[in-house]
Image: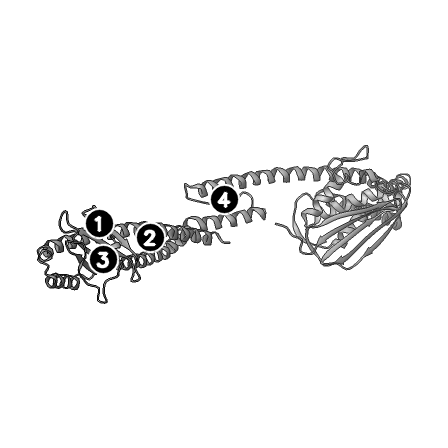
């Protein structure tokens, strides 16, 4: 449920609850006031009537008394009935058109009281009976029955008024609460949510401007602080990672240096031999010059390959052809492959380019190939394949070494874990991090027949 809807429902609940409480309080107050007013009105009518008909009761002038009470009931709309008893306590006059009820004198007996008020509930509705003794020491009484319809009618009007006011307040409150909450709460929170999405996508270091002194402003300051801390942490991590890459690259270059020296020694030996001959017999044939130039070109090509790998420190994202990198890595390691008698089997399928950092991918593949070579010190077969599978580019590097011991399979991707005396323990960890950075995954299978590492890189692998 949306936050603005929760605020709207809460405000509506508060308004309705207040409306009920106010309606209940007003109902009780209005009811009490109207009843007191009816009682005062009835007492006044009864007293005025008693003073007007007292003499006629003593004279037993029933006609005059009846006339007076009939006139009174015509002028007072709230009067339901009037009846009068004589000095002996018998019914003397009344306004009941069909005769008075037989238990009329029992409705509100005065007893020893001078005045009595009693609420009656006949079939016609609630009646407030006000009984007044006309003469002291005599049972002569006058009773005025007042309807309570005015109270019911007034309460209905009050209820309708309160309902209308509550509805208006609820609508106005809903509009105001929606407008104010949207301006004061919802919009700032939406900005904070969008800001957190930017942080989740790696937009560290950005700030959100909130000119507010409340909790939302305080929360925005915390988010800004978190963003700056994450940016600083990422910078530290990137720098550490660069250092790790440089360290591992130097290690890889060290492993390749022996092969490089061996390969350079052959053309240098040829050049030295020719120049030694030239020293003793200063004449070179065209074939001798071609040998010298070929040896120089060979050494230049070898040095170019090594320098291209050694200088690739900057991270740049571009369209990368994985098969081309695989072939370059094989060329870089061809010295060790020849020296150890390792057969290379390339099974490369056509792959589309992927968005990646060429140097990092080359570093990862070189680490895996060198590990495979070192796993086969007495020769073997290195199989490198590439193919497409479910919108992923797959690269597999398999050797025919002795495999990875079961007890260390769970640790080979851990930083600084190594079983080699001269190893850094960063090779496979860097491979894992590089592939993970490109949105991919690296797995392996190993047994006594060898080890196969599989790299999966999605075709849409560029992460922010």
Q: What is the x, y in percent for residue 250?
A: 74, 38
- Which SS class for mark 4? loop
In primary-sequence order, the first of circles 3 and 1 is: 1
Q: How crowded is mark 3: few (under 14 residues within 10 Å), some or many (20 or more)?
A: many
- Residue under circle 2? 23
Using the numbered discs, state the Cα–Cα distance from disc 4 to disc 3 in whole angstroms: 76 Å
| Residue depicted at 51% across the width and 54% down the height | 1
Q: Nearer the viewer, mark 1 or mark 4?
A: 1
**Residue 1 or 111: which is nearer the viewer?**
111
3 and 1 marks in contact (CB < 8 Å): no
In primary-sequence order, the first of circles 2 and 4 is: 2
- Residue under circle 4? 207
**Would you say 224 lies left or right of 86 here?**
right
| Residue depicted at 77% across the width and 52% down the height | 395
In primary-sequence order, the first of circles 3 and 2 is: 2
Using the numbered discs, state the Cα–Cα distance from disc 3 to disc 2 in whole angstroms: 26 Å
- Indicate which disc residue 146 carries: 3
Q: Nearer the viewer, mark 4 or mark 3?
A: 3
Using the numbered discs, state the Cα–Cα distance from disc 1 to disc 2 in whole angstroms: 37 Å
Q: Which of marks 1 and 2 is in front?
A: 1
- Indicate which disc residue 110 carries: 1
């Amino acid at each position: 449920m949306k936050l603005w809807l929760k605020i709207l429902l809460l405000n509506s609940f508060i308004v309705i609850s207040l409306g009920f409480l106010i309606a209940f309080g007003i109902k009780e107050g209005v009811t009490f006031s109207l009843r007191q007013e009816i009682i005062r009105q009835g007492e006044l009518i009864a007293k005025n009537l008693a003073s007007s008909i007292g003499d006629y009761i003593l004279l037993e002038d029933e006609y005059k008394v009846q006339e007076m009470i009939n006139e009174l009931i015509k002028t007072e709309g709230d009067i339901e009935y009037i009846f009068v008893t004589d000095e002996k306590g018998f019914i003397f006059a009344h306004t009941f058109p069909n005769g008075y009820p037989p238990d009329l004198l029992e409705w509100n007996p005065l007893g020893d009281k001078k005045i009595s008020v009693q609420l009656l509930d006949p079939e016609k509705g609630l009646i407030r009976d006000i009984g007044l003794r006309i003469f002291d020491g005599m049972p002569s009484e006058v009773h005025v029955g007042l309807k309570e319809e005015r109270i019911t009618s007034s309460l209905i009007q009050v209820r309708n008024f309160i309902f209308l006011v509550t509805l208006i307040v609820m609508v106005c409150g809903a509009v105001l609460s929606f407008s104010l909450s949207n301006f004061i709460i919802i919009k700032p929170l939406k900005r904070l949510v969008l800001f957190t999405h930017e942080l989740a996508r790696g937009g560290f270091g950005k700030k959100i401007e909130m000119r507010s002194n409340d909790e939302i402003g305080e929360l925005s300051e915390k988010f800004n602080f978190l963003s700056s801390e994450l940016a600083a942490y990422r910078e530290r991590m990137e720098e550490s990672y660069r250092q790790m890459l440089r360290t591992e690259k130097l290690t890889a270059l060290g492993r390749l240096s022996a092969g490089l020296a061996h390969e350079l020694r052959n053309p240098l030996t040829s050049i030295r031999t020719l120049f030694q001959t030239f020293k003793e017999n200063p004449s070179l044939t065209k074939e001798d010059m071609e040998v010298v130039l070929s040896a120089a070109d060979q050494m230049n090509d070898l040095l170019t390959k090594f320098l291209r790998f050694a200088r690739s420190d900057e991270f740049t994202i571009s369209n990368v052809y994985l098969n081309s990198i695989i072939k370059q890595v094989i060329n870089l390691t061809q010295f060790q492959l020849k020296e150890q008698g390792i057969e290379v089997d390339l099974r490369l399928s056509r792959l589309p380019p992927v968005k990646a950092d060429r140097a990092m991918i080359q570093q990862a593949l070189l680490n895996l190939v060198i590990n495979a070579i070192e796993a086969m010190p007495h020769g073997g077969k290195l199989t490198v394949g590439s193919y497409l599978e479910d919108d992923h580019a797959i690269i597999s590097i398999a050797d025919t070494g002795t495999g990875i011991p079961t007890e260390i399979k769970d640790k080979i991707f851990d930083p600084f874990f190594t079983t080699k005396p001269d190893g850094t323990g960063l090779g496979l960890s860097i491979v894992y991090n590089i592939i993970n950075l490109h949105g991919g995954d690296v797995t392996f299978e190993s047994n006594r027949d060898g080890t196969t590492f599989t790299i999966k890189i999605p075709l849409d692998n560029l992460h922010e």
